[in-house]
Image (spheres, helix red, strand yellow):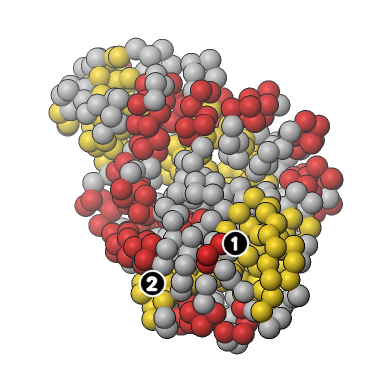
Amino acid sequence: MGGLARRIAVARGDAAADQVLRGAEVLDVVTGERISGDVAIVDGAIAGIGARWDGPVRDLAGLTLVPGFIDTHLHVESALVTPDEFARCVGPRGVTTAIWDPHEIANVLGVAGIDWALAAADASVIDLRVMLSSCVPSSHMETSGARIGADELAARKDHPKALGLAEFMNYPGVIGGDAECLEKLSAFEGRHIDGHAPLLSGQALSAYAAAGIRTEHEATSTAEALEKLSRGLRILIREGSVSKDLDALIPLMTERLSPYLCLCTDDRNPLDIGEEGHLDHMIRRAIARGVAPLVAYRIASLSAAEAFGLKDRGQIAPGKRADIVALGSVEGCDVRAVWANGVELTQEIFAGRSGTPGIGRGSVRVPRIEPGTFRLEGSGGDTPVIGVTGGRILTDHLREEISATDGDLCPDPARDLARVTVIERHGINGNVANGFVRGFGLARGAIASTVCHDHHNLIVVGADYGDMALAAHRLAEIEGGFCVVENGTVLAELALPVAGLMSLAPFEEVRAAMKDLRRAAKSLGVVLEEPFLQLAFVALPVIPHLKITDRGMVDVDRFAIIR
């Protein structure tokens, strides 16, 4: 006897379970009740709760069981490690399902990157689901390593790990009825389509929702979130390494609205995961700020499952996947043990994995770079400046009077005006664009990265052109990554040879390197808590208000290149 018949027999008490979790209480995220009794697991599913079953017993006396956490929108690439290392990092923290948009690697490698993500998801210990990347590139105002069309996406939509169409960042194209956007949306009509529409409101928001888009993670205020909820969009509350929206949206986290809210991290680096946590951090923080535990755990599990049509999970109940988190404290969300599809996520389980082979080696191909590359030719005067604020990916469109020296608009550290440069690194056209950024506080040297959303060209912020040139050359030598340079010396670096985005090293080594990079950046005067991911968003032309790509400065509100 196997399969469904065996599960029912175990539930009746006529057969022994594969595992019996005994001694803990179950927090039911529907009723809010605490249910005593065993949890019986068979073939990765829950056969029954609230009674006593035969089978191998795991004693969990004094603990509370909650459903596995679901991260509803993230880019594994932002953790800077391969998918198997990502699972090893977040699985023991309670994440049993993660919904991945691989548009970072897709923007470098095209459909090969998506196919790699699907294969990695197939092999993952936790349940990785893949949203097929809708915007490669994110707009016409940047040079990506590839383009992906509707036919290529549609050909993969029936893959067992494909969940739908990923965040549709080209919201002006959706609203305006752009033919390419409509082709992609039509190919996924009736499937899940994820949104990305910062500050969108009014009739424009209605037009966007009318396209069949049903979830949205860019709301940064309660007013914005409530309007989007009223237009049929479920809100994914985000707390990444840069975009920190949880505190602003906590007033929404009520029992009334909880069925329509989810949690996501979007972009969270290994340093923050190691120091603070992942979704467990969000849950702790929400409860500490007055959110009812029932609401917090419901949003982290059942509401997320319902939003994405994952009917087999989200509650510890018969017939559901055995995705279970054992907690010492519900309020403290201190994870003691985790089961994903009935498998306990021990370090031995992860050690037995073969790992994900890296792809996209040698993908950083930059043109000839010299100190003069970073000159911004001009006669001076009123000049656009990107204004950066810590904890926000929205940037300000500032204007400053800047004088020219020998025909060059030079960086001015005394006014916190640093040079920002984007260099096309896919070997396509060799574009270089220069501009100004304020908010880093950088007084000397340079920091550079090939993690540069979403085109992932090479971006450098600096006060010294020689150091900027050295930083760019060094990243090409190490196949991409991060580096900090001062006075002709590389102070710290992290190689990311997998498409210039991910390391092949263990999570712990990457985290240690990020600590060194952060310290080195601060030694240059940098005031941002997370300068490297913040730097990545300076170049994303679908987030208001002023950005820079390899093609120039971008006024996102006008969706146009202005310089």
Q: Is residue 9 left or right of residue 557?
A: left
Foreground of the two, 84 or 415: 415
Residue 157: x and y in percent read 63, 49
Foreground of the two, 23 or 243: 243
Amino acid carrying label 2: it is: Glu
Q: Quadrant of the N terminus?
A: top left
Foreground of the two, 249 or 43: 249
Classify 10 Å Cα crowding around label 1: few (below 14), some (14-19), many (20 and above). Answer: many
Residue in the picture at 26% in, 35% down? 335
Q: Is residue 414 left or right of residue 226?
A: left
Residue 183: x and y in percent read 79, 50
Callout 1: SS: strand
Residue 14: x and y in percent read 26, 19
Residue in the picture at 28% in, 59% down? 508
Residues under labels 2 and 1: Cα distance? 22 Å
Tell me the tag on residue 493: 2
Q: Is residue 502 left or right of residue 199?
A: left
Q: Is residue 133 visible?
A: yes
Residue in the picture at 38% in, 72% down? 493
Using the image, determine if residue 194 lies above or below residue 15. Answer: below
In this rendering, the label closer to the viewer, 2 or 1: 1
Q: Is residue 144 visible?
A: no
Q: Are marks 2 and 1 in contact (CB under 8 Å)?
A: no
Classify 10 Å Cα crowding around label 2: few (below 14), some (14-19), many (20 and above). Answer: many
The image shows a total of numbered marks equal to 2
Tell me the tag on residue 437: 1
Q: Earlier in the sequence, mark 2 or mark 1?
A: 1
Using the image, determine if residue 174 lies above or below residue 477. Answer: above
Amino acid carrying label 1: it is: Val
Residue 188: x and y in percent read 70, 43
